[in-house]
Each structure stands twice: as structure tokens, then as C-alpha cells.
């Protein structure tokens, strides 16, 4: 898949998300519709950015994203519907919205905690998830194709390795330290 995507100079994150959600690679038509669906849901619900991100900044982006995901419950008219179609809808919405949440949280963190300028850009039609992140993250919205392809690969690796590790982006989360042999009680340093 990666070799084919490389040969055709195509982004892979959205394809991998489809694969993880549905168990097979999408057809070209499914892929095009799925990208449009994600693109359509990148913008956050009315009032969400103000209420959840701008009015309650955090110096910790992962914490802010986790709290934002929880807060999405209040913006979902069908939050208690545990049917498969609704869970799929919620999952796709979160996949589409998380990059926007992340960039917005980063911008308000820059302003409040780093005392730097912040800027918010609306999603641009036709962009992959990687391109969306880069264009909304930067003041001038400019990025190279190589930067977008590299970010796409990083997103793919995170998606393919369980996503939950996004809550702890430290190297230890991806590559845990070797297990230690427990010390004999007599070998432990004494604490006085």
C-alpha cells in the first residue's frame, strides 16, 4: 500500500482510517467520498471553540484534547445512541474534528502561556488531514508537499498503532523502556 501511494504521490492517512473502520481498503469512489465526509466535518460545532478552547485554555495540549473529546458529548444530539451507525458517525466526526481541536488548542496556548500571537484559519476545501493541520497551524498557511507527506506518514503510524498513544506522545509511550529486574529487598537503597 505504501509503495503504491508513493508511486502515485497520494496521502495514506484517510485510507488507513477507512481500513481500520471497515476492515478493507476503500475503492476509489469510497475513498473520494470518505475524504469529502472528513472534510465536511473538520469545522467544530457552533460555539465549541469559544466555550471549550478559547475560554478555558490549557498549557497541556493532550489534556485539552481529551477534555474537548469529552465535551463533544454536550454537542451531540444522539450522544446516548449506542447503535453501530451512530457510533460510526461519532467516530468519523471525532477523526475529522480532532485536528481542528488540536490546532485551536495550540493557538490559544501560544497566546495565553507563551505570550505569542495566535491565528485561526478555517479549513480549506480539498485538503488531506495532514494538509489541513499544516495550513491551519501556520500563520501564512504555507507548507511544502514533502512536509505534508511526512505528517501524513506520522498520522498513519499513530492510527495504525492504536491511536490511544496520542494521549501520551512521549517516546516512552511508543517505545517503552526494557523491563527491569526487581531488586532484592537487601539491595534496595535505604531511605532515612
Image (cartoon, helix red, strand yellow):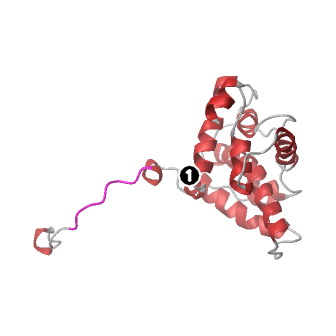
| Residue range (magenta) | 175-182
80 or 18: nearer the viewer: 18
Query: Toward which corner of the image does residue 163 lie, by quadrant?
Result: bottom right
74 or 154: nearer the viewer: 154
SS assignment for the magenta stretch, majority: loop
x and y percent of residue 107 in the render?
A: 70, 43
Query: Toward which corner of the image does residue 162 lie, by quadrant?
Result: bottom right
x and y percent of residue 83 in the render?
A: 82, 73
Image quarter hosting the N terminus: top right
x and y percent of residue 2 in the render?
A: 62, 34
In the image, residue 154 above or below residue 147: below
Badge 1 density bin: few <14, some 14–19, many ≥20, Cα 10 Å: few
Q: Does the magenta stretch include residue 177?
A: yes
Query: Toward which corner of the image does residue 90 lie, by quadrant?
Result: bottom right
Image quarter hosting the C terminus: bottom left
Which residue appears at 82% of the width and 47% of the height? Answer: 38
Which residue appears at 85% of the width and 34% of the height? Answer: 126
Question: Helix, strand or loop at disc 1?
Answer: loop
16 or 117: nearer the viewer: 16
- Count the labels in the image: 1
Which residue appears at 79% of the width and 62% of the height? Answer: 88
The residue at which mark 1 appears reads as: 161
Viewer can see residue 148? no
Instruction: Looking at this view, name the residue that lies furthest to the left.
Output: 186
Q: Is residue 156 left or right of residue 135?
A: left
Viewer can see residue 135? yes
Which residue appears at 65% of the width and 48% of the height? Answer: 109
In the image, residue 115 above or below residue 175: above
Amino acid at each position: 500500500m505504501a509503495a503504491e501511494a508513493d508511486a502515485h504521490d497520494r496521502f495514506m492517512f484517510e485510507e488507513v482510517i477507512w481500513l481500520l473502520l471497515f476492515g478493507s481498503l476503500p475503492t476509489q469512489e469510497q475513498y473520494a467520498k470518505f475524504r469529502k465526509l472528513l472534510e465536511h466535518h473538520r469545522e467544530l460545532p457552533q460555539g465549541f471553540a469559544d466555550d471549550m478552547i478559547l475560554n478555558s485554555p490549557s498549557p497541556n495540549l493532550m489534556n485539552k484534547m481529551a477534555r474537548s473529546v469529552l465535551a463533544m458529548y454536550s454537542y451531540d444530539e444522539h450522544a446516548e445512541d449506542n447503535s453501530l451507525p451512530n457510533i460510526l458517525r461519532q467516530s468519523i466526526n471525532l477523526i475529522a474534528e480532532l485536528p481542528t481541536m488540536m490546532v485551536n488548542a495550540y493557538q490559544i496556548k501560544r497566546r495565553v502561556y507563551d505570550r505569542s500571537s495566535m491565528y485561526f484559519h478555517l479549513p480549506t476545501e480539498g485538503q488531506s488531514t495532514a494538509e489541513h493541520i499544516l495550513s491551519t497551524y501556520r500563520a501564512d498557511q504555507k507548507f511544502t508537499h514533502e512536509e505534508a507527506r511526512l505528517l501524513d506518514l506520522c498520522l498513519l503510524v499513530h492510527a495504525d498503532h492504536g491511536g490511544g498513544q496520542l494521549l501520551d506522545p512521549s517516546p516512552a509511550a511508543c517505545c517503552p523502556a526494557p523491563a527491569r529486574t526487581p531488586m532484592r529487598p537487601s539491595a534496595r537503597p535505604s531511605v532515612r
